């Protein structure tokens, strides 16, 4: 599904030069929910932007479904951390969700229905006519998720999607991601700096080193389903895994 | 409703009455009392068969048409060029110095140049008005289009929003608070330049009436022209706000909660 081969990226030149990613290899299978964790400023966003075709990496290759990424692949959607900037404030919620569908071969009516359906699946069926600023932060991020879902991507990238909401909302949104992945056939790559979140949400957790980033750990998360905020988090395997990931993130050798 | 109206407008009659009393007491020929101005205005312009006299129709209408027409041209040119310069860095490199130079030239100076370049009459007047008012529109459009949030552009890129939609649904709305700021300035500037362009070489218009009145030392008529201009300015500004307000509701809402 997603193949990253010896990816490197360097920003700038001279004294402002920043080596963000160095020789990163990663492969994601179809239908997988992969969480990428790493210390802040480690190049996670650079990685995501390379996958999305928003920047051209200085070295290595990214392939989505076998195709070399040169610009954003047609079947790829992104949920950004900063929903207040990535939703268009001058459009209603429904228009925000429907806008990306304009490139698809759909009638106006079909687009409207698809937008409504996507909003329904994130629990915002009634909010279509509202404007983003009339919604809370968590609801705005739900709109951004609905926009990505309506687009019916095969690969969904999420860049610290719950980094700007409070803890309660964060848990709700984590569960929303687990719920919608059950209904849609898609691969999800979720970037986070929250260790617990990566273990709770992911099928697999990849840990990046600090910049320049490369993979320092790759763990399978085999937790009994369905996952639940209380019981999953107290499960011995969860506790063990989060400790393991935590050590990797801090650069301490596992014991 | 009536209470707020009284609250907002009580000063107007007070000033008018004070003006009337003072000018009657002073008896200066340059400062006729408001009642004299109003009766002169009525006699000249508002005593026609359909309220307006021929003189009013023949002079107010061309002025207003030129004002609106020139403003339309300036908006079209200013916004189109501004957005293009704001979004294309290479274009900005070429045109920015020219813009900075041209906008530093006072428009009344250009009037003399245009006098040579263009035919007397409407062509000359439109050129003067457009040259005078296009700058705030152009500069604000450049600024607005240049500073569209990068994440908004990236979102459009990720979701493959086609180019025309990107322009009309993303770049223009994102730049619209700035663009409207420029348009608001241009509305009041347009009125000033309309008069300037009619003071010389014109055969009709409100500016022309003012020149005649001034040549005849007809002070009530001159003041009457000033009143008409004030009313026109107020009306245009009000109309503008009526268009602007619903179009920028989202902006005020987003700012309030941000």
Image (cartoon, coloured by chain):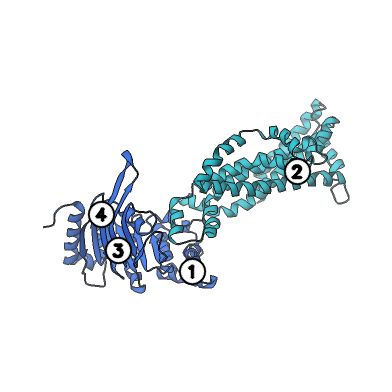
Chain colours: A blue, B cyan
Dot 1 and dot 3 residues touching (CB under 8 Å): no
Disc number lying in front (1 or 3): 3
**Considering the numbered disc 2 on the image, is that residue within a helix, a strand or a loop?**
helix
Residue A3 got which mark?
A: 3
The percent coordinates of residue A219 (x first, y second) are 20, 63
The secondary structure type at the circle numbered 1 is loop
Tag of residue A23: 4
Question: How much space separates mark 1 and mark 2, taking CA atoms?
Answer: 48 Å
In the image, taking residue B16 as reference, residue A28 lies left or right, namely: left
Q: Secondary structure at mark 4?
A: strand
Mark number, residue B123: 2
Residue named by callout 1: A104
Precedes in sequence: disc 1 or disc 3: 3
Quadrant housing residue B221: top right
Which residue is located at x 78 percent, y 34 percent? B200
Q: Which chain is mark 2 on? A: B
Which disc, if any, is residue B37? Answer: none
The structure residue drawn at horizontal position 33% and vertical position 51%, both measured from the top left corner, is: A58
**Gap in angstroms between the C-alphas marked 1 and 4:** 36 Å
Same chain for mark 2 and mark 4? The answer is no
Are dots 3 and 2 in contact, CB under 8 Å? no
The answer for how far apart the CA atoms under marks 2 and 4 are is 66 Å
């Amino acid at each position: 599904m997603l193949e990253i081969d010896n990816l490197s990226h360097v920003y700038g030149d001279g004294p402002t030069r920043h080596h963000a990613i160095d020789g990163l290899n990663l492969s994601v299978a179809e239908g997988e929910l992969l969480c990428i964790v790493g210390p802040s400023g480690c190049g996670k966003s650079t990685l995501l932007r390379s996958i999305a075709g928003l920047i051209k990496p200085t070295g290595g290759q990214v392939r989505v479904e076998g195709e070399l990424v040169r610009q954003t692949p047609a079947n790829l959607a992104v949920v950004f951390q900063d929903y207040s900037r990535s939703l268009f404030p001058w459009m209603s919620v429904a228009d925000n969700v429907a806008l990306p569908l304009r490139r698809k071969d759909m009638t106006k009516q079909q687009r409207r229905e698809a937008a409504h359906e996507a909003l329904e699946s994130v629990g915002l069926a009634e909010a279509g006519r509202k404007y983003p600023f009339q919604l809370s932060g968590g609801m705005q991020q739900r709109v951004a998720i609905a926009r990505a879902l309506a687009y019916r991507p095969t690969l969904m990238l999420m860049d610290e999607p719950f980094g700007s909401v409070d803890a309660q909302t964060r848990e709700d949104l984590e569960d929303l991601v687990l719920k919608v992945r059950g209904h849609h056939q898609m691969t999800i790559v979720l970037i986070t700096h929250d260790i617990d979140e990566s273990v709770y949400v992911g099928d697999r957790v990849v840990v990046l080193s600090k910049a320049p980033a490369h993979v320092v750990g790759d763990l399978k998360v085999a937790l009994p389903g369905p996952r639940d905020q209380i019981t999953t988090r107290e499960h011995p395997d969860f506790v063990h895994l989060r400790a393991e990931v935590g050590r990797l993130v801090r650069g301490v050798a596992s014991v | 409703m009536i209470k707020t109206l009284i609250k907002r407008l009580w000063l107007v009659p007070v000033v008018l009455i004070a003006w009337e009393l003072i000018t009657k007491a002073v008896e200066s020929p340059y400062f006729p009392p408001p009642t004299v101005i109003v009766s002169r205005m009525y006699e000249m312009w508002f005593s026609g068969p359909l309220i307006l006299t021929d003189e009013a129709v023949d002079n107010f209408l061309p002025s207003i048409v030129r004002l609106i027409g020139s403003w339309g041209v300036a908006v079209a040119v200013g916004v189109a060029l501004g957005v293009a310069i704001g979004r294309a860095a290479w274009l900005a490199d070429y045109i920015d110095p020219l813009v900075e130079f041209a906008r530093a030239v006072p428009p009344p100076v250009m009037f003399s140049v245009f006098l040579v370049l263009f035919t007397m009459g409407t062509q000359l007047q439109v050129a003067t008005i457009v040259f005078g008012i296009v700058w705030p529109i152009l500069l604000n459009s450049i600024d607005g289009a240049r500073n569209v949030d990068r994440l908004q552009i990236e979102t459009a890129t990720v979701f493959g929003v086609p180019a025309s939609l990107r322009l009309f649904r993303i770049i223009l709305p994102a730049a619209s608070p700035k663009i409207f700021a420029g348009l608001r300035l241009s509305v009041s500037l347009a009125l000033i330049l309309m008069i300037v362009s009619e003071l010389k070489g014109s055969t009709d218009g409100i500016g022309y009436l003012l020149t005649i009145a001034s040549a005849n030392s007809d002070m009530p008529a001159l003041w009457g022209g000033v009143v008409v201009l004030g009313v026109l300015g107020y009306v245009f500004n009000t109309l503008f706000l009526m268009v602007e307000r619903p179009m920028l509701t989202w902006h005020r809402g987003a700012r309030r909660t941000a």
